[in-house]
Amino acid sequence: MDKPIGIFLLLWPSFLGLLLAGLETSIEFKNILIVIVGSVLVRSCGCVINDISDYKFDRLVKRTAKRPIATGDVSLLEAWLFFIFLSFLSLSLLFLTPSLTLKISALCALLIAIYPMAKRFIKAPQFVLGITFGSGVVISYSLQSDIFSLSLLILYLGVVAWIISFDTIYALEDIEDDKKIGVNSSAILWGSNAITIAKYLHYIFYISLALVAYINEFSLFFIPVMIALVAMQYYQMKLVADKKYLDSFKFNNWIGIISVIGFISEVYIF
């Protein structure tokens, strides 16, 4: 909770999915709360299981060396108990949702558990993260509707591309340490092309937003929203050029906020 960037980067895609469903049906306030609380709980579960899995590696990486399990401030037993507690809260929250949401969430829970191990066996674990985090779009959409549309598929694929993009930039911060300890990442796999590929993946996200806007006949207000997003991407790439990888990663919070504001305007104003 003291470093909520991960929560925000799960929350904004989830809100996009919920708002997409809101174009066809009125969004229940209960579902807004479920998305917010669910994002906090799920991200927290992911942090704990990731720290349990990586505590030996975390001790060897400067950025992660002070994580609580790595330092011994929290024991493995305490971490597992906390993970079980958070999982119980998450499951309790799902009982307030439709059966379809429950089924989709169960699959995503499996992906959350698998992800920490993915970086050991998959050359680009960011793809697993993208599929997992991006599922928030589908889960939140299913709270309001059980009729999956072309717009949902386009938005989901775009969000997955966005997540892979910003997590590749994030991985650049630790690339040298990751190489030494044998942890995989898309930044290592793509090498000198990593930044270029991440940039194009980010544009795929923008294209998906534009397609959703076109299919659903968004108002002209969404044009300045898209212009603002492109300008923000230009600024983000300047941060990357200056090797401020963490700053660039965190800046995606604002990109998510502007995207959500654009969708909110279409649902409630125009």
Image (cartoon, rainbow, N blue to C red):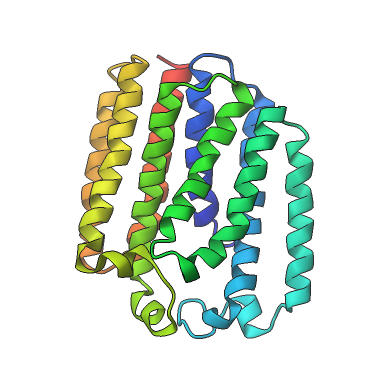
Q: Which residue occupies 67% across, 50% down?
A: 41
Camera sees residue 47: yes
Q: Quadrant of the C terminus?
A: top left
Q: Which residue occupies 25% across, 25% down?
A: 223
Q: Position of residue 11 (x, y in %)?
A: 53, 43
Image position of 157 (left or right of 203): right
Q: Which residue occupies 24% across, 54% down?
A: 197
Image position of 228 (left or right of 63): left
Q: Position of residue 220 (x, y in %)?
A: 27, 18
Q: Position of residue 211 (x, y in %)?
A: 30, 25
Q: Which residue occupies 29% across, 47% down?
A: 201
- Image quadrant of residue 116? bottom right
- Image quadrant of residue 207? top left
State whether residue 167 is above or below residue 152: below
Q: Quadrant of the N terminus?
A: bottom right
Image position of 9 (left or right of 48): left
Number of marks in the rendered image: 0
- Image quadrant of residue 196? bottom left
Q: Position of residue 269 (x, y in %)?
A: 44, 16
Camera-side residue: 84 or 185?
Answer: 185
State whether residue 255 is above or below residue 184: above
Camera-side residue: 132 or 59?
Answer: 132
Camera sees residue 1: no
Camera-side residue: 248 or 109?
Answer: 109
State whether residue 146 is above or below residue 258: above
Image position of 49 (left or right of 23): right
